[in-house]
Amino acid sequence: MNETVLRAEGVRKSYDGLPVLQGVSLEVGRGEVKVIIGPSGSGKSTFLRALALLEPVDAGEVYLEGEQVSGLKEKELATHRSEIGMVFQRFNLFQNMTALGNVMVALRDVRRVPRQEARARALEFLARVGLRDKAENYPEELSGGQQQRVAIARALVMRPKAMLFDEPTSALDVELVREVLDVMESLARDGMTMVVVSHELRFAHHVASSILMMDEGKIIEEAPPEQFFSAPSHERTKRFLALVE
Amino acid sequence: MLASFDTHLFWTALTSGPYWRGALTALELTVVSLATAIVVGFFVALGALSRLRRFRTSAWIYNWLFRATPTLLLLIIVWDVIPQQFTVFTHNWFTPFLAAFIALSLNEAAYMAEIIRAGLLAVDPGQELAGRALGMRRWQILRRVVVPQAVRIVIPPTGNEFITLLKLTSLASVISVHELLTAANEQASISFSYREVYGAALVYYLVIVSVLMFLQSRLERRFTFRSRSRGRTAVGLAATAHDAR
């Protein structure tokens, strides 16, 4: 029942001889939500980009539904990237397109969906994040929270096998965090497989199947939320939680 | 004492055939040279930004060679030196206009390449990252996302280049292209009424540049990515950006 959707094995990466990932492994089952926390510079974002196949790794592999997807040629990589949804800290909506255009473009260019159908599907997903009425607005005209919801719709419309979130609320004003977390929670309820880098501990407590602590390029601890928060086994985790809370 | 301004002579010059044709030649030469320079410059800019060393080197050499060579010298080389080397260029089809077009395009392409390179670099790298995450190919990202956003940045300096080029066309008189200033000089040598004949020439330049400036502002508005009341002042932009938050 709990088949593995996304798996990383011994992922290593250095920048200019500086090790950022020192053998990171992860297994995410269908419908699971893994939340990664850790201090800045611990390699969380780099690891997420490696999972999204945006970052070539020095060693290790990434598997999507059992198929090795890392280290392939650019063309195959692009295909697999479209099967993994990625949401960025800074939204990265295409500034020259409306919300609708943002959600449609990859359906048209990558999946070759005819215009009318792509449009209908994009509108459906904009409605899902509550932004049907903002379809014709450009990113510049939307609040940060709305931009991030469009970015989520843009990833979802590709019907990804897993969704990755890289600190999706850390660039948002506090009053806009909730609307984005609500969308993510509803995704989790609907059974989306997710890996989330975030320091929203209440969200993690609520939604996560398990929480992972990263430090110095390694996952040093993984546990279900109850256990993770009440009885972290690592001294480093305890100290970090004390700081974040 | 100064003689009074001869309005009749001024009008005669302004409406004379040589002036019209001269202005038209200058305008044609500017438009075709700039259009060609934009296309060539775009590829030189892509070369300069390429991951492949041989493209970067070729772009560098092009830039170095055609920015270093004075426009006047390049005109002379194309018109006088090349036909001496290759007899095909001595035939009738090789007109002064064509020679001027080649020289000005080659020269201008080097400047445009730098402007376009700066424009492409000014687009937030997060835009390309988001495109890659969706599985879009590099050329798709370039066409759909990066180039449209770079265009907005590139328009004002390109307007400058148009004006510079318009004035440079008068250099083509040395290879016997009959452009506007040639017509004015001929008139001046007949009438010695410098104010009237050069004043008339100035009117043409003013009119052409006015039209250009009008078209430029239209184009800038076209590439400002907002839905409501397109094209506002910088102050208006700041105000609505504030509202949106």
Image: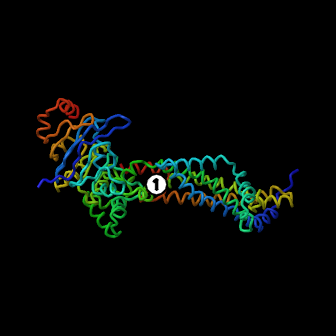
Residue B89, placed above or below residue A208: below
Check disc 1 and report the residue beneath it. Answer: B149
Say how the picture is coloured.
rainbow
Say what secondary structure mark 1 lies in: helix
**Residue B56 appears left or right of A27:** right
The x, y position of residue B213, in whole percent, is 60, 57
Give residue A82's quadrant in the image. bottom left
Residue B222, placed above or below residue A176: below
The x, y position of residue B63, in whole percent, is 59, 48
The number of callouts visible is 1
Q: Chain of mark 1?
A: B
The x, y position of residue A178, in whole percent, is 24, 47
| Kind of residue indicated by mark 1 | Gln
Q: Residue at x 72, y 52 (%)?
A: B72
Q: Residue at x 34, y 66 (%)?
A: A112
Q: Residue at x 57, y 51 (%)?
A: B157
**Residue B106 appears left or right of A49:** right
The x, y position of residue B82, in whole percent, is 72, 57
Give residue A110's quadrant in the image. bottom left
Camera-side residue: B152 or A219? A219
Q: Outermost residue toward the right? A: B1
Give residue B4's quadrant in the image. bottom right
> Pointer 1: residues within 10 angstroms few (<14), some, or many (20+)?
many
**Residue A28 appears left or right of B162:** left
Camera-side residue: A101 or A12? A12
